[in-house]
Amino acid sequence: MDWSVIAEYYPRLLDGAWTTLQLVVLSGVIGVILAVPMALARLSPNRWINIFPYTYIFFFRGTPLLIQVFLIYYGLSQFEVIRESILWPFLREPYWCAIITLALHTTAYIAEILRGAIQAIPKGEVEACRVMGMSKFTMYRRILLPRAFGIMLPAYGNEVILMLKGSALASTITLLDLTGMARTIIARTYTPEEIYIAAGVMYLVISWLFMIFFKMLDRVFNRHRLA
Amino acid sequence: MNKWLKAGALAVATLASTAAMAGDKIRIATEGAWAPFNYVNEKGQLAGFDVDIANALCAEMKADCTVVAQDWDGMIPALRVRKFDAIVASMSITEERLKQVDFTDHYYSGGLRFMGAKGKVLDTSKMGLKGKVIGAQRSTVGGQYLEDKLSDVVKVKLYDTQEAVYLDLIAGRLDGAISDELPTYDWLKSDQGKNFEYKGEPFAKNDKIGIAIRKNDALKQKFNKALQAIIDNGTYEKINAKYFPFPIY
């Protein structure tokens, strides 16, 4: 083992870790925003409304993330229409392709987690809202969604950490995330053990940061349990 | 007591004989994504110049060889941990690689060259490349040249396979790519590559391609002897002619 390569290359690994962090946070935020209407539509008793989220979730949960990354990066670019559209400046960049794919992928999972959480809210609380005379919109905005966020937090934290690891697939489309950077360094130094260990430690640190963050969120959303 | 001795002797004999047999069994790795040198054919088998050379060498050595596919950037680490015994995958003999593995004598020579879309100007001088997006396969001589010599002026994009470089050329994400001249020669003639051409002259032409083996492995001498033999008896020339109308040794 030659540990000096880590000393030499860790600034570049940190660059990669920064890209990884951006991928996970940006796609995670977009994912949550898209997941709310998706979960609500999924809960609708109207078939014509819930068929769309159902199909969407079926597709994104049922296919490997790697295939989705390839389809969006290499697949879309095969079409002349797309290459000439206004979206091309974004779709041209591996960075945005990775964020779009990760966001679409995690949306499907978050929507399912959120749907489960909404359904897990005790019936009494829903009835209490109705007794108060709340409209459906107020009920969701003030009671059900905040409650559901509290319930889903542990599962959502889990999903974010899964996405952190899934983001390594961005390295297959030329993005220099933590994994991509590690592979590029190894291509030069031929020291896979040392560099992968260093990259692994950085992934651990990032997921540890996420765990702390979710613990803090838990204190806010579930403060009723602390008392 | 005697019985145990016999059993022990038998075990030692068995071990010894498998060791002797293992000497004739050689596992050879290639990439399978570097046409026409190594690729996967319609039948799903590994084929190409490298594979033909490997088979010819094995026939010459009367060895029992299996050719396996391995991702390019894990090639040398996998050789070192004995996943296979030799790499016949168009690997250039470089100083950095020589620190990790040994090479046989070279079995062909190459050089680098730029390529880009027909009808678009690509000035391949360092000044002319300023601001361009240039791709190459990660962990290749071309990729390293790009990082070492040009990363201060161009935007470097590194791919896992050469095929992915071609895909992104077609998609228009790259202004150009650096690759070994010979595999590109084949692609430019293909349907996919017909809208692209070489840009500029070949460079880094002292590129020698050899077979990588673990350090101090006796296979080196065996391969070298066999290589000389297939060059002398004309087998090499036949394989060469199958892929290129000019000698590549």
Image (spheres, coloured by chain):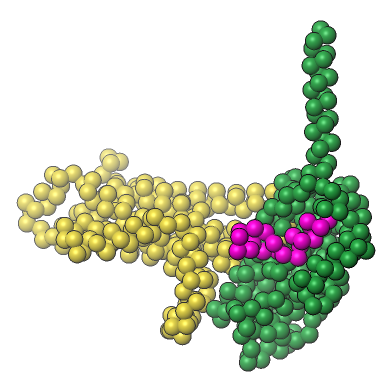
Between residues A87 and B131, which one lies in front from this camera angle?
Answer: A87
State the residue in front, B191 or A62: B191
| Quadrant position of residue B93 | bottom right
B57 and A139: which is toward the camera: B57
Question: Residue B108: x and y, percent?
Answer: 84, 68
Determine the residue positioned at 82% across, 77% down: B246
Q: Is residue A7 visible?
A: no
Q: In the image, which residues are magenta?
A: B38-57
Q: Position of residue A182 (x, y in %)?
A: 64, 58
Residue A149 percent coordinates (x, y): 29, 52
Query: In this rendering, would A100 be left or right of B53?
Result: left
Q: Residue at x 85, y 64 (%)?
A: B235
Look at the image and give the colour of chain B.
green
The quarter holding residue A168 reads bottom right
Visible residue check, residue B127: yes
In the rendered image, residue A146, in percent from the top left (x then y), is placed at 25, 54
Residue B44 painted magenta: yes
B178 w.r.t. B67: above or below:
below
Q: Colour of chain A?
A: yellow
Q: Is residue B192 left or right of residue A136?
A: right
Residue appearing at x 75%, y 76% in the figure = B181
Quadrant that contains the N terminus of chain B: top right
Tell me, yes or no, whether the highlighted magenta stretch contains residue A179. Answer: no
